[in-house]
Amino acid sequence: MLLNKYNIEISMEDIKKNAQRLTNQLWKLIPMREHEEDWEKQLETVLLEIVGLNEIFVGPIFLQLISKLEGLRVQETDFEFYRKTIFECISILQGIN
């Protein structure tokens, strides 16, 4: 169990499930951009949730994720760099497991 700023116990299993769900949401970003779908909206949704997690569990992992995803949101990049950054974010989330 981990305590957060609200002193609510959250099991490691629940944290891992949430990290896996967010990982799946990040994976969706790659084909969405590749197929010229509305990837920006998906990115904003994931970013919003990670910002919220950072409020609950303050830590460098979430700051790193927020920074990378916000960078993708505000800075136009080529597809290869975009994809590489998404993979980096997925690796960071997998580190929570």
Image (spheres, grey):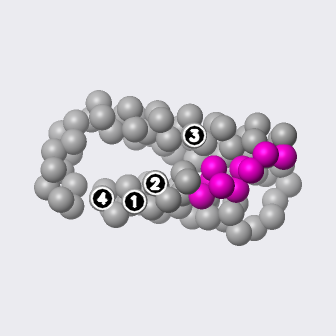
Give the image location of residue 68, x and y in percent: 61, 59
- Which part of the image, by quadrant, shows the N terminus? top left
Q: Which residue is mark 3?
A: 25
Give the image location of residue 78, x and y in percent: 85, 54
The CA span between labels 3 and 2 is 11 Å
Q: Which residue is mark 2?
A: 49
- Specify whether residue 49 is painted magenta: no
The CA span between labels 2 and 4 is 11 Å
Q: Which residues fall within the magenta stretch? A: 36-44
Tell me which numbered mark, 3 or 2, is placed earlier along the sequence: 3
Secondary structure predominantly adopted by residues drawn in magenta: helix
Mark 1 Cα shell of 10 Å, populated few (<14), some (14-19), many (≥20): few
Q: Which mark is residue 52?
A: 1
Q: Which residue is mark 4?
A: 56
The CA span between labels 2 and 1 is 5 Å
> CB atoms at circles 4 and 1 under 8 Å apart?
yes
Mark 4 Cα shell of 10 Å, populated few (<14), some (14-19), many (≥20): some
